[in-house]
Image: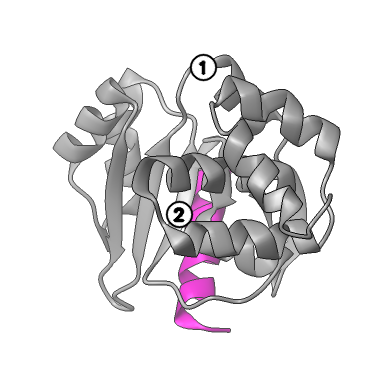
Amino acid sequence: MTAELEVLHDATTRLERAGIPYMITGSIALSYYAQPRMTRDIDLVAELSGRDAKSVATLFAPDYYVSEADVASAIASAGMFNVLHLGKLVKLDFIVRKDTPYRRHEFGSRKRVRMPGFEAWIVSREDLILSKLAWAKDSNSEMQLRDVQALLAGGADRTYLERWAGELSVMDLLRKNLDAGHDA
């Protein structure tokens, strides 16, 4: 098992023992659904509230560096904080789940999957596509759009994608990618 997968296994085990709902997203999820891609970090969405900052910091000590103040700030702004495994130097990017209709639905649609050596919660293929479209819209990232095309090539629920693409203001990007020959 690679250092990244060992850290992911450890982190998800800690989260589950603490009763903190999470899901894997980003390049680890892309690797699960489509194509492996080198990653510098592990992206996790977590459902956290204001009272969780201290418990999250404690949860990862002493094997990880995590700033309780950064966790509290991320929870307050529905933003992001980092956790660094001190021995393996693998970074976890925690994204606090936003409280919007789509993000609540996305989190509720996560799936339990078998990873190498353990089980974990992961974003659905369709929701990963929608998130990557949203990131591409905001960043003009060609890499995100290549990821979308790789995910679409594996098949996806077009009705679901179209339902939420309008709400996320990514319908034009979705249609361009579907028209590129990857009709879901």
Image height of 4 relative to 26, above or below: below
Three-letter amino acid code at the position of disc 1: Thr
* Quarter of the image with the N terminus in it: bottom right
Instruction: Residue 162: give x, y in percent of width and height.
Output: 74, 30
Instruction: Residue 35: give x, y in percent of width and height.
Output: 66, 74
Which class describes the residues within 10 Å of circle 2: few (<14), some (14-19), or many (20+)?
A: many
Dot 2 corresponds to which residue? Answer: 43
Secondary structure of the magenta portion, mostly? helix
Task: Describe the element under mark 2 as helix, strand or loop.
Answer: strand
Q: How many marks?
A: 2
Q: Which numbered disc, 1 or 2, marks the residue that appears first in the sequence? A: 2
Q: Residue at x 78, y 60 (%)?
A: 181
Which class describes the residues within 10 Å of circle 1: few (<14), some (14-19), or many (20+)?
A: few
Instruction: Residue 34: give x, y in percent of width and height.
Output: 71, 68
Dot 1 corresponds to which residue? Answer: 100
Q: How far apart are marks 1 and 2 (CA)?
A: 19 Å
Instruction: Residue 48: give x, y in percent of width and height.
Output: 42, 28
Q: Give the range drawn in magenta.
A: 1-16
Image height of 158 relative to 150, above or below: above
Query: In the drawing, does residue 28 fall left or right of residue 123?
Result: left
Does the magenta segment cover residue 75? no
| Res 69 → quadrant | top left
